């Protein structure tokens, strides 16, 4: 038997108040959407969701990583491999990307169950992450949001088991983005909903009920993909569902997160679920995909995690629409970005353990931790006596900081710090914080982010950000 062992999520704390899009001042408590910061993308959000999901689970247990996204920009460079390295997983881990459809997140989740049920893998890490863009001040911009969801699917007792699934394929040009384009396009809304979304979702869900023998009245919560805040209401009466069974679609707080949207809503439903409940999840895109999960008693023993609720509590609204445009590189610029060849591939290969996995070295003679690894221990002077020491899961503190107002940033200044973590010092950028909130001894955690786009492609490293108040003493 296969089932979900753990789940996690990531929602960027940066928020774009929707009032700013139309040129109006933002109001506290007004509708907003979650947007990735200028150093975040589908990869970094997936890593953050994976860390939230895995928690204290031994990462050597992971046999495969499936990464679903429609917004990962590279075509001949696997995103799942980058994620596996950032998570410091075993080299033997199987990795694969899924893309091309907004329902690829649920496709990955079902394929993970198939792999575990067949015995091909013990534990599969499923990640769905998207950072899509509608044209500035266009019809889609207000509805889109950025987020990631993660699931660990494994054998044996877990927290939820798959009771049934149904997918249908449908060729229809309602949403699309051409190769090399930044913005998603849409045909006329009424046509897309009436001829695409509504009939396909109803067909898939009805077939799921028929195949599994389940009834709509048994559903505790239905996590349904929807293009906007109202469209899912058209599904209720034909399916025999009631409004109170619908999982909050998070419009006005997050927005439609593409391939991660239905998985994110499933995470939100699992956060409040109790043993014995039936959860429904359905995604849309070139057809529809529906799955039903029965919640198991093990959910009561699942350790706490940030999840959807924890990330919604952390927010940092932008003060201007121009800051959003700068962060997405949509503002007018004198010089094009990414015109050089970028980092040396040789150097990147040699330093991948430090740069991508954030692995330092502990001296086997005295135990002192170093980052990056030198030849000689600073403490006992032993030479070439090291064992790997992963820093990404540790909490550090700020020892010193400086504000750089000259380095280009969506929201100046760029904040550089020296942090102490596990006894070593790391020179690192501090993000997700305003200058007035920086202080010495500020507790920080470490997050996987883009460092720059030299060579026209994302180059990654780790950065620090403040620990949420009350999470860690």
Image (cartoon, helix red, strand yellow):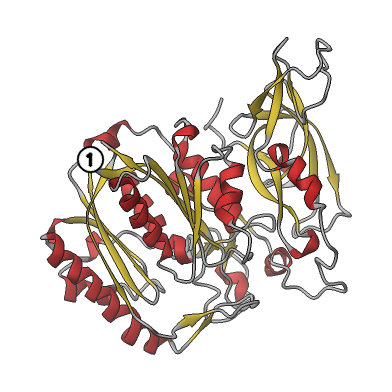
x, y percentage for residue 210?
A: 13, 67
Instruction: State whether residue 13 appears in this view.
Output: no
Residue 136 in the image, given as x and y percentages of width and height? 63, 77
Can you see residue 241? yes
**Residue 123 placement, left or right of 446:** left
For the residue pair 88 and 159, the one nearer the viewer reads as: 88
Q: Nearer the viewer, residue 45 or 77?
A: 77
For residue 354, above or below residue 248: above
Badge 1: how crowded within 10 Å, few (<14), some, or many (20+)? many
Instruction: Answer with left or right where residue 440 lies relative to residue 131.
Output: right
Of residues 352 and 418, the one nearer the viewer is 352
Residue at (44% x, 65% y) in the render: 251
* Residue 31 position (above or below residue 332): above
Instruction: Please tell me whether mark 1 sits on a helix, a strand or a loop.
Output: loop
Residue 5 horizontal/vertical position (percent): 34, 40
At horizontal 72% and vertical 73% (from top left) the residue drawn is 330
**Which quadrant of the figure contains the C terminus?**
top right
Q: Choose top left, top right, bottom left or bottom right for residue 338.
A: bottom right
The x, y position of residue 353, in whole percent, is: 69, 37
Disc tally is 1
What residue would you read off at disc 1?
A: 296
What residue do we see at 59% from left, 63% from top? 72
Quarter of the N terminus within the rendering = top left
Q: Residue at x 41, y 45 (%)?
A: 124
């Amino acid at each position: 038997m296969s089932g979900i062992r753990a789940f996690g999520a990531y929602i960027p704390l940066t928020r774009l108040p929707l009032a700013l899009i139309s040129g109006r001042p933002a109001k506290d408590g007004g509708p907003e959407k979650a947007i990735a910061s200028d150093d975040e993308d589908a990869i970094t959000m997936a890593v953050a969701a994976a860390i939230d999901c895995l928690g204290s689970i031994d990462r050597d247990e992971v046999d495969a990583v499936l990464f679903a996204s429609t917004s990962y920009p590279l075509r001949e460079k696997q995103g799942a491999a980058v994620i596996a390295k950032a998570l410091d997983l075993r080299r033997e881990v199987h990795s694969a990307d899924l893309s091309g459809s907004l329902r690829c997140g649920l496709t990955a989740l079902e394929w993970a169950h198939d792999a575990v049920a067949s015995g091909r893998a013990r534990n599969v890490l499923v990640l769905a992450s998207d950072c899509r863009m509608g044209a500035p001040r266009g019809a889609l911009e207000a509805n889109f949001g950025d987020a990631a969801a993660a699931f660990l699917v494994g054998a044996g007792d877990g927290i939820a088991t798959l009771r049934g699934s149904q997918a249908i394929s449908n060729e229809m040009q309602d949403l699309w983005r051409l190769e090399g384009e930044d913005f998603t396009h849409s045909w006329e809304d009424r046509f897309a909903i009436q001829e695409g979304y509504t009939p396909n979702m109803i067909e898939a869900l009805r077939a799921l009920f028929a195949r599994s023998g389940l009834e709509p009245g048994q559903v505790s919560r239905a996590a349904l993909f929807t293009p906007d805040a109202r469209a899912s209401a058209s599904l209720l009466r034909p399916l025999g569902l009631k409004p109170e069974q619908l999982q909050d679609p998070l419009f006005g707080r997050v927005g439609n997160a593409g391939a991660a949207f239905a998985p994110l809503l499933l995470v939100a439903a699992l956060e409040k679920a109790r043993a014995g409940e039936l959860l429904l999840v359905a995604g849309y895109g070139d057809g529809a995909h529906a799955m039903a999960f029965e919640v198991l008693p093990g959910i009561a023993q699942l350790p706490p995690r940030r999840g959807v609720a924890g990330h919604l509590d952390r927010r940092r609204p932008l003060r201007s629409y121009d800051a959003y445009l700068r962060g997405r590189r949509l503002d007018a610029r004198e010089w094009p970005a990414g015109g050089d060849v970028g980092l040396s591939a040789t150097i990147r290969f040699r330093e991948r353990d430090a740069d991508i996995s954030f692995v330092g070295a502990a001296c086997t003679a005295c135990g002192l931790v170093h980052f990056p690894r030198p030849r000689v221990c600073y403490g006992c002077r032993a030479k070439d006596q090291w064992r790997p020491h992963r820093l990404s899961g540790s909490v550090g503190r700020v020892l010193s900081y400086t504000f750089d107002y000259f380095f280009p940033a969506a929201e100046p200044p760029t904040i550089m710090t020296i942090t102490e973590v596990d006894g070593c010092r790391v020179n690192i950028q501090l993000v997700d914080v305003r200058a007035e909130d920086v202080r010495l001894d500020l507790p920080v955690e470490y997050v996987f982010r883009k460092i720059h786009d030299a060579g026209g492609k994302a180059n990654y490293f780790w950065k620090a950000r403040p620990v949420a108040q009350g999470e860690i003493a």
